[in-house]
Amino acid sequence: MRCAAPFLALVVAGCSSALPRPLPPSPAPPAADLRTQTADQQAVHALSRLTFGARPGDLEAVHEMGVDRWIDRQLHPERIDDDKAEAWVRQFEVVQKTSAQLESEYQNPGALVNQLSARNTGGLTRDDSLLLRQARLNLRRITEEVQAARVGRALLSERQLQEVMTDFWLNHFSVFAGKGIREQYYLADYEHRVIRPLALGRFRDLLGAVAKSPAMLFYLDNWESAADSARPRLVDPRSPVVQRAVRRRFPDAANPQSPMAQQLQRRLRAGLNENYGRELLELHTLGVDGGYSQQDVINAARALTGWTIAGPRQGGGFTFTPFMHDAGEKRVLGRTLKAGRGVEDGEELLDIVARHPSTARFIAFKLARRFVSDTPSTALVERAAATFTQTDGDIRAVVRTIVTSPEFFSREAFRAKVKSPFEIVLSALRALDAAPDRTARTAQVIAGLGQPIFGRQTPDGWPETADGWMGTGAILNRINFGLVLAAGRVPGVNPMAFPGVESLRQAPREQQVDAVVQAFLGGDASSVTRSVLLTGRNPLLDAAAPSDSSASMRPTQAAATGRASAPVPQLRGLAQVVGLALGSPEFQRR
Amino acid sequence: MQRRVFVRDSALALVTMGLSPTFLRRTALGMALPQGARGKILICLFQRGAADALNIVVPFGERAYYGMRPAIAIAPPSRSAGGIGAIDLDGFFGLHPALAPLKPLWDRGLLAPIHAVGSPSATRSHFDAQDYMESATPDNKGTSDGWLNRYLATSRTCEQCAATPFRAVAMTPQTPRVLQGSAPSVAMNSVADFTVRSGGAQAAQLEALYRTGSADLIHGAGTEMFEAVKMLRAANPQRYQPEHGAAYPSTQFGQRLLSIAQLIKSGVGLEVAFADIGGWDTHVNQGGATGQLAQLLGDFGASIAALVTDLGDRMKEVVILTMSEFGRMARQNGSGGTDHGHAGAMFAIGGAVKGQRVVGRWPGLAPEQLYEGRDLTLTTDFRAVFAEVASRHLGATKLDALFPGYTPAAMPGVLR
């Protein structure tokens, strides 16, 4: 078995005796002389990549501390006080509860339908429908609270790198809230107790925690994957021992009509489901070109049979169910898992894939792509992969290799990444020093830009590169977001409440532009952008035919009445500068 | 069909025309295109997640089918009572009962299912297989552009059409893989949403931010977008309501097809449209004549039927092609669902389609006939179908550019 305290990533070295002895990490000395960014650029760059955007005062803080010390501090979130963000999250009752608590407190509308229709022999009464409606609303609240907590934390947290890494791993190990009703009970546990505590921990611990999380077990169907009928099972499901244990553990199951009994029957009959086994290799570890076969996929899935979710009364967490487990011998990636073993099969499989050289390269590549550029150099990926291997998958060490590299601080990397919708919204709110909204409204804005939180249906996660986010429709939505935000029409966000706003409001336009370029665009705007912000006029229009052109954008009746596309009023003064800056090409980059 | 000219700016035109009132006048006057444009339209609909072809175009004449799917098979039409069986097409194949709205299209000779079709790649990864189908280069992930984009970039059938930003439109939040590449295309959620939410000078100021001559992805997308918004506003597609009693489902997919119909009717020069619909990855409890898959097919079939009804006579110029990255295992799995398989099925619909027949050689479902002993065997390469539609419908001549390294041995005979 693995370490008993999987979340204590920092002390894990002592309890994983099976690991090959890790070499001492060899932190390369910060090669400041190889950096081609100016000192000012380095500070802006570090903030743009290791945080969700600079708040007022952040840039000065980085300069004061020195960019290398600041990065080192971010790499150790446990040393950073984060009272404000933690207090924010504490107010969300749902987030504090385990999935088992949620499952028992928030009635499953699907089960409720069964109960109600069984009682009434069929149809639902009006009262029943009301009950059902309430159950559905309650359930939706779970996901909404998880989303609001996430946005607020990303906005407030001083541990920005930890939040960025949480976002990275939630995307790498993506799960989908819409998978089924039960997925929604598991999301808070997944984010707060599986991913975030291990976001800078050891990869094997993270992989293991994910593999055992109800969120992933349910999303990729492993919870109901069992040995095929032709295969020997570790324990015969029909044996009296199993039947007695089942009756003891699941008293409801005595009633053959109960959902519990039906679920058990399904587990007893079930066969192999390859879904998780495949994505484990393709998306979570080796990568699609990592060198595995269809037979490896099948045998990985066989090794993981019986890894399932306990009933709510048993705590609702991970459980290994011997009567579902395929007890035959399996060969995976050239290694043999001996016959007759139980949960060790899956554990050994995770050991094998976590330490596979393809995994080191794949994770190194994805991290370099997140932090440096859409096409990170092979040399950087190789160095990061070497760190991964030497440190036995110490994520903090791999990230350190990447974010202190000359490639990271190269001129080519500066502003080279296009923001995701989450990053667009968060960076705008952080630049405005906006207060978080208690409701899910900000999350809905992010969803409207194409990236609903826990809303990626496919397990590959959201795009990590520019071409996945930038297109004609996307740019339109982003520009509209800037206009709506600057007009004060994003619910829960006051765009004109940042420090110093009162004096800035009265200031000359030039000073307003300087302040806005500094806050939103990292102090760097093209001459065209600056000129448009300054004059509020369109230079091309002035050169051509000004009288004709404004007609081009006069809203038609359809646009004026369209629900989603109602125009915002003409912005004036400081709000106009902010709206134009948020809609500028520069703001799309980080 | 009436088309309108749209003068796309170049670096030079930018200076001379600025925000080009000229183009607006032309658009408003509805100046027709010179002949040469074929006026043909292709609508590609992608079922993401690997649709279960064997329960969509049901081989009820195949005994092995029922043996492998005891809990989820669709009953043969003869034994059907109350519409729970397959809808007979040709005595061997039938449509899933939830696809009843498509049966009239079959009867009118507009619909041809293509069976045992798909990618020769052995991959069972959704992401790879979708990538291969959209790039049309199976087992080669190095292809940077999608096949529809390569068609747009290489086609000379419609030189004037290049002047409209709406030549290729995806009703999706992001540009799909199939339309990525050098030729411009537009992605939108709906016609109604495609507008800058600001009147007057402000939108023009924003536009100026993107018209800097800078050639990167962001400036390019911005410039294209502003052109497109103005043109669409002038054409005002939303004034076109569904015709001929077409009833689009209120689902996202149904509404996206409605938007496509509106674009076609407004004459903005649409040649290639794309939409997708998710949820086909039915590993668990997919159901039979009713249930999860049936519900999805209900939306899918009713939406397509509404589009065909709405377009009426225009269907003479339109081909609708449906596709999914691969099929699913012939046997049901342990969860009342189906795992990833190999060959699948497509639908071709339109006036140009040689309908009322199931296209493709049927490989059978006996154990020795299955691919790797588990999946429907492939007998038609999806590229052969694409190639036939691209060349014979759209008039593409450079098939080697569209499908590098692939020459279809014969056209599958989807079109008349």
Image: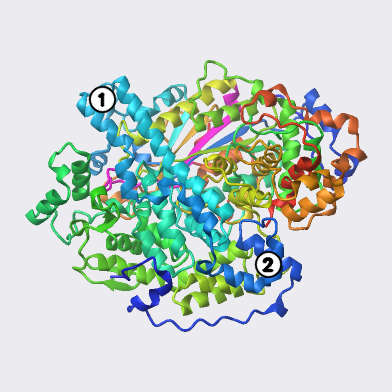
Numbered range of the magenta stretch: B314-339
Label 1 neighbourhood size at 10 Å, few (<14), some (14-19), many (20+)?
some
Is residue A570 visible in the rendered structure shown here? yes
Q: Depth check: A427 or A307 in front? A: A427
Amino acid, disc 2 = Val
Residue at horizontal 84 percent and vertical 41 percent from the top: A536
Q: Depth check: B300 or A322 in front? A: A322
Q: Depth check: A373 or B178 in front? A: A373
Residue A305's disc is none
**Magenta segment includes B351:** no
Residue B184 placed where, x, y %? Answer: 69, 44
Amino acid, disc 1 = Ser
Side of A103 where B397 appears, left or right: right
Residue B205 placed where, x, y %? Answer: 81, 40
Outermost residue toward the top in this view = B245
Q: Is residue A300 above or below residue B99?
A: below
Residue A433 placed where, x, y %? Answer: 66, 50
Residue at horizontal 52 percent and vertical 15 percent from the top: B245
Pointer 2 chain = A
Q: Which residue is mark 2?
A: A62
Residue B80's disc is 1
Label 2: element kind: helix
Side of A39 where A458 appears, left or right: left
